[in-house]
Image (spheres, helix red, strand yellow):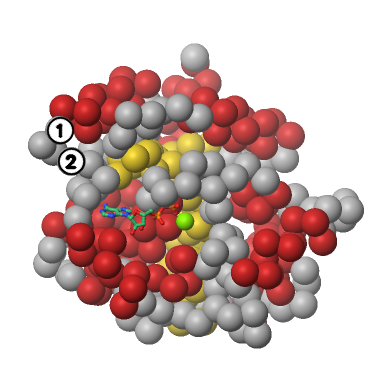
Amino acid sequence: NQEFPRPSRTRLIAVANQKGGVGKTTTTVNVASALAAHGARVLVIDMDPQGNASTALGVSHGTKDPSVYDVLEGRLTIAQAKVQCPQFETLDVVPASIDLSGAELEVADLANRNDLLNEALSAFLNESEEHYDYVFIDCPPSLGLLVINSMCAVTEMLIPIQAEYYALEGLGQLINTIGLVQEHFNPNLTVSTMLVTMFDKRTLLSREVYNEVKSHYPSIVLNTTIPRTVKISEAPSFGESVISYDPRGMGAIAYGEAALEIARRSPSVIAAIDAKRGEH
Ligand code: ADP
Ligand code: MG
């Protein structure tokens, strides 16, 4: 039972990759749960209209339920929309419902359309009685307005990379978009973390993908990789993270180690990573 350091300020982390099925939601849900299981106070914001993170954290997200859609359109505050995850007392969730898919068009004409989530989140964190250690945002598989809103609301990006043949394809485009957001909207944005998911230690390919990511982003990719396990994939159908569903299994252990590595990345380390990135 290792010691998880607590950040002195709230760490704001968006989990993004425009590819679908690479483990964004699984990573959001399980890293957030692992941190909460170690006593951290965590907020997960589901920005994907599919609502998979909401499902996996056991919170209801029908179109009648309060959701991040209401937050973006100014009908509810985050304080009003958040609900507690049934498995972890210190984990709150702002769910997403399918009607969030209409938000991109509905807010398209607003001057502050990129900043809707940032404004709501800043207001919430400033006004809230409770101090959050971490906020995680689960992004949809696109580079559209919902993702730009997420990038404008955080300081850190966590990019899950699936250990498969085309793993790094599209990564340049994602890094490029992050660079544009940094330049135009959010100078504090940095890619703090990459995590290789669905790693199969029996295959050479998995190793090769890891080594390639490591050679390009040595200080950003976590040492921990996430194995492909059945428990990880079946936990969401029980409305649970693998951390609560199978706490002693390989999946929970790996996500626990990834969470510990993330917790140990202090802001000063992240600043150093960023300075190094600027050298290239
Ligand atoms: P994304 O959010 O990027 O679209 P998901 O996290 O939903 O990706 O993962 C895609 C699918 O792969 C889901 O069915 C999920 O349960 C499964 N999956 C993700 N990570 C693992 C893993 N480590 N082992 C087994 N299945 C996984
Ligand atoms: Mg997802």
Query: Is the Cβ of the residue at disc 2 closer than 8 Å to that at disc 1?
Result: yes
Q: Which residue was labeled with disc 1? A: 203
- In the image, residue 205 sits, relative to residue 12, either above or below, namely above
In the depicted view, which residue is nearer to us: 228 or 115?
Answer: 228
Give the residue drawn at x 67%, y 31%: 180
Relative to 221, say whether 103 is above or below.
Answer: below
**Residue 204 % position (x, y):** 16, 27
165 versus 14 height, above or below? above
Alpha carbons under labels 2 and 1: distance apart: 6 Å
Dot 1: within a 10 Å radius of its alpha carbon, few (fewer than 14), some, or many (20 or more) residues? Answer: few
Q: Amino acid at mark 1?
A: Thr
Q: SS class of the residue under badge 1?
A: loop
Measuring from the top left, give residue 33's x and y in whole percent: 33, 67
Tell me the residue at 52%/58% (across/down).
137
Provide the residue designation for mark 2.
Answer: 200
- Looking at the image, the residue that sits furthest to the top is 280
Q: Residue at x 47, y 47 (%)?
A: 20
Give coordinates of residue 74: x percent, y percent.
78, 72
